[in-house]
Image (tube, rainbow, N blue to C red):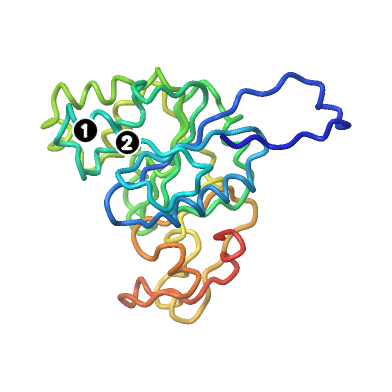
Amino acid sequence: MEVKEINPHHPVAAAPLQEPVNIICLKWGKLYSCEYVNKLYRGVKKHLDRPFRMVCFTDDPSGVDPAVECRPIDPLVVVPRLANNIMLKITLLHSHTGLKGPTLFLDLDVIIMGSLDDLFDYKPDRFCMIHNWVAWRKQLLRPRPDIGNSSVVRFMPGTCDHALDRFIEDPDHAYNDFPTEQAFMTDCMRQRRDYWPADWVHSFKHHCKPIFPLNLLLAPRVKPGIRILVFHGRPNPDEAIAGYRGKLRHTTRPAPQLAEHWV
């Protein structure tokens, strides 16, 4: 558990110690190395002022910073269909984890750019997630779909058990009626869900990368004041910093300004 040192002469030093919040992540399979966990931990440590406990749910804890608690996901024994599947994330919402108090889930492929305290203070009694982004051209003739993105989710353990319970009761419904885990999660949490303010969590792909063909000439730009930058699909954070070569529409110029946050 990370406990930040308090200056005894500071006016708040005499106040009761604040209960630590939870930061959790998921490293399963070979997609991301332990360095992604460690960089995420260092970003949290830099940008969260309150005490916190960081837990990584993983099948391979090797190389993870000792300050991060590594734990397995027990329900895999009961629900084998979840193994190595995108639906795995919903198990972390269940109270079987034993976590208490406000909990923030972060995907590994994010860069923390600003205060995480804001994400704990915002509508604390609600289940908060990203309003999923879609390409601007897909919004010309229809409104933005009411579907969340689960890269940054804050919840209170014990209030979300029905998501995993619903999956266990009818996994075919989850797989066949929803295109992704986050669409299923959005539907499960419909009564308690709110979206983060649009300026707090940005997508590298949708907000930073210039549109084609300008992406071939201009470097990505990051708007000041955002809290978290999300990388869904390619490039990953390290690729974005160095510059990414893919299909012409997905190619990006180097973004070295991100390196100070991805350490």
Identify which residue, 121 or 59, lies in the foreground.
59
Residue found 14% across the figure and 30% down from its top: 171
Q: Mark 1, residues whose alpha carbon is within 10 Å: few (<14), some, or many (≥20)? A: some
Position of 262 compared to 6: left or right? left
Outermost residue on the bottom side: it is 217
Position of 103 compared to 212: left or right? right
Position of 189 compared to 152: left or right? left
Q: Give the secondary structure at mark 2.
A: loop
Q: Give the secondary structure at mark 1.
A: helix
Q: Which mark is residue 72?
A: 2
Q: Is the Cβ of the residue at disc 2 closer than 8 Å to that at disc 1?
A: yes
**79, above or below 56, in the image:** above
Residue found 15% across the figure and 34% down from its top: 80
Image location (x, y in percent) of residue 144: 37, 45
Residue found 61% across the figure and 23% down from its top: 19
Outermost residue on the right side: it is 9
Q: Quadrant of residue 24?
A: top left
**120, above or below 142, in the image:** above
Image location (x, y in percent) of residue 54: 50, 37
Identified by mark 1, the residue type is Leu
**4, above or below 233, in the image:** above
The quarter in which the C terminus is drawn is bottom right
Image location (x, y in percent) of residue 116: 60, 40
The quarter in which the N terminus is drawn is top right
Distance CA(mark 2)–CA(mark 1): 9 Å
Q: Quadrant of residue 165?
A: top left
Position of 121 compared to 39: left or right? right
Identified by mark 2, the residue type is Pro
Q: Which residue is mark 1?
A: 76
